């Protein structure tokens, strides 16, 4: 199963095992990673699971879908070219070793 | 003061209680933390329960966090244990098994319970309300064979369950006593729109209709007798509101009035050592006249977090989070930001030809935007939340011919340039 690294705003890293077929948000929440709030439980409703995909890994994750793209304009922390909502990122073996950064604010 | 023990006792293992302990430890609180959760299962998310048919016991996906979260943070999570009594003079609770647990701070996060169906026949088999994961499983399994489903109550839960039942292939009728669906919850404009949307999906809706009694055959529900005649039913689900679980506070002599009455710090007005958060708390809010009680995930999370931070000694002002809410009703994602009053002026803007499924209803009070209801338009909902949280008001003129999304983008650009 793929391993994903969540880097917190203070630079500390949490290495977690994600289950293929789930979404990245679930891996963060299931492992108690701070900073992924996911108030709506993964429905693309709240934008509180915002992440920045590490620049070296952007192509592996791909671009946001249309609804997500619009929502990313209104996240609590600034939008960057690497912004995604982690509830919309499907986990697969191709993501093994992925690094994502957690923004300062979610709410 | 000398009577006080140490540590925090949280009564309730729902979203609000979880939020308290997450914030306590997150803010560096080092004292003992005990949570009494009366269900014998790790705290879980409730919103998904009414959004699909649950036919198998849910795995860890619905848990708020795994068991290790509590262990690593030294949180004493007492599953399947309830608090039977509260002694505020001695600063201690007594559990159902008679154990006495002292506290320095007590947080009531007891939630709400469903209003029972007050009609003859309500005790028949095949009649269910939804609150717990077990309830969801019972309803989900019943839906695998149900052909005629009657939903009593045209509120959020009722309409979500009606769509779930319809998706499992049953004939579905919603019976609502009021003249409109979601009568107090959304603007009249949206009520009409939602009604049409659900009827288009084949859900029959009877408003202004009372359930008089339910009749059974062999102890199993057979038909629902309404003011408009009998409806065949092999499954009845009802969602007719909830009442706060405030009896522990009431029996302890704390001020209670349809919820535990708290101040802007979410402290009981009767006892500064006791807080109440989530569905069970009646509290002041800067956007409301008088005290309000909100049943929502946002309110549970934000109130719990505020109290957790406050007890831990961190910065925490008064409770003034912008209320927001969502309800997924089959193909309709309804979201609400802010608090609308019935006297507000509502302007409805439909989506354009590319996005006909979208709709927004903007509520203005004294020429100032106070609440926004959206259908299938999460970006506009988020823009509404951003703008309603800012001090700069939004007037009807600001919004003329535009969207909040465009306005929020423009204001953000201006901020960056300034």
Image (cartoon, rainbow, N blue to C red):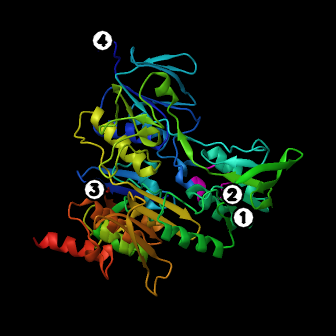
Q: Residue extending furthest top?
A: B2
State the separation of the CA atoms marked 4 and 3: 40 Å
Residue plotted at (53% across, 67% down)? B191
Q: Which residue is mark 4?
A: B2
State the separation of the CA atoms marked 4 and 1: 60 Å
Q: Residue extending furthest right?
A: B218
Residue plotted at (79% across, 49% down)? B214
Q: Which residue is mark 2?
A: B151
Q: Tell us which disc is closer to us: 3 or 2.
A: 2
State the separation of the CA atoms marked 3 and 2: 40 Å
Write the start and end of the magenta stretch as one range. Answer: B49-58
Dot 2 and dot 4 residues touching (CB under 8 Å): no
Residue plotted at (74% across, 48% down)? B127
> Split into 4 quadrants, where in the image is the N terminus of chain B?
top left
Q: Which residue is mark 3?
A: A105
Query: Is residue B193 rendered magenta in the image?
Result: no
Precedes in sequence: disc 1 or disc 2: 2
Query: Is residue B56 rendered magenta in the image?
Result: yes
The chain to which mark 3 is attached is A
Indicate the secondary structure of the residue bearing disc 1.
Answer: strand
Residue at mark 1 shares a chain with residue at mark 2: yes
The chain to which mark 4 is attached is B
């Amino acid at each position: 199963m793929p391993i994903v690294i969540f880097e917190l705003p203070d630079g500390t890293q949490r290495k977690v095992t994600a289950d293929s077929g789930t979404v990245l948000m679930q891996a963060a929440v299931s492992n108690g990673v701070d900073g992924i709030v996911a108030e709506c439980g993964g429905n693309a409703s709240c934008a509180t699971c915002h992440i920045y995909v590490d620049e070296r890994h952007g192509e592996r994750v791909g671009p946001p879908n249309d609804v997500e793209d619009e929502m990313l304009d209104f996240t609590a922390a600034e939008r960057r070219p690497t912004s995604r909502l982690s509830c919309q990122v499907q986990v697969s073996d191709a993501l093994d070793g992925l690094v994502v950064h957690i923004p300062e604010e979610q709410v | 003061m000398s009577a006080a023990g140490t540590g925090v006792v949280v009564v309730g293992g729902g979203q609000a209680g979880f939020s308290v302990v997450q914030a306590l430890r997150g803010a560096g609180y080092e004292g003992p933390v005990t949570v009494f959760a009366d269900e014998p299962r790790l705290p879980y998310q409730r919103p998904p329960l009414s959004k699909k048919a649950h036919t198998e016991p849910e795995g860890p996906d619905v848990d708020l966090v795994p068991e290790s979260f509590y262990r690593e943070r030294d949180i004493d999570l007492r599953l399947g244990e309830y608090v039977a009594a509260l002694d505020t003079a001695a600063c201690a609770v007594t559990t159902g098994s008679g154990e006495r647990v002292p506290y320095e701070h007590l947080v009531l996060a007891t939630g709400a319970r469903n209003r029972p169906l007050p009609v003859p026949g309500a005790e028949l088999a095949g009649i269910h309300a939804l609150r717990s994961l077990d309830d969801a499983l019972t309803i989900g399994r019943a839906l695998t064979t149900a052909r005629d489903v009657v939903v009593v109550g045209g509120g959020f839960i009722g309409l979500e369950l009606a769509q779930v039942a319809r998706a499992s292939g049953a004939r579905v009728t919603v019976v609502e006593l009021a003249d409109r669906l979601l009568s107090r919850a959304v603007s009249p404009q949206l009520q009409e729109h939602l009604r049409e949307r659900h009827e288009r999906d084949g859900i029959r809706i009877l408003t202004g209709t009372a359930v008089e009694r339910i009749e059974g055959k062999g102890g199993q529900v057979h038909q629902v007798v309404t003011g408009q005649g009998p409806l065949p039913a092999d499954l009845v689900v009802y969602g007719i509101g909830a009442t706060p679980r405030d009896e522990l506070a009431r029996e302890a002599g704390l001020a209670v009035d349809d919820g535990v009455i708290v101040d802007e710090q979410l402290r009981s007005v009767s006892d500064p050592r006791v807080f109440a958060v989530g569905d069970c708390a009646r509290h002041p809010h800067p956007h409301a006249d008088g005290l309000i009680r909100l049943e929502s995930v946002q309110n549970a999370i934000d109130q719990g977090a505020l109290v957790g931070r406050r007890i831990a000694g961190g910065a925490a002002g008064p409770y003034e989070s912008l209320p927001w809410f969502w309800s997924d009703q089959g193909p309709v994602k309804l979201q609400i930001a802010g608090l609308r009053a019935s006297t507000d002026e509502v302007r409805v803007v439909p989506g354009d030809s590319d996005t006909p499924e979208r709709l927004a209803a903007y509520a203005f009070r004294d020429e100032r935007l106070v609440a926004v209801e959206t259908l299938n338009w999460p970006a506009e909902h988020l823009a509404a939340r951003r703008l309603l949280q800012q001090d700069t008001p939004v007037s009807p003129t600001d919004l003329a011919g535009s969207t909040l999304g465009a306005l929020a983008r423009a204001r953000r650009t201006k901020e960056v340039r300034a």
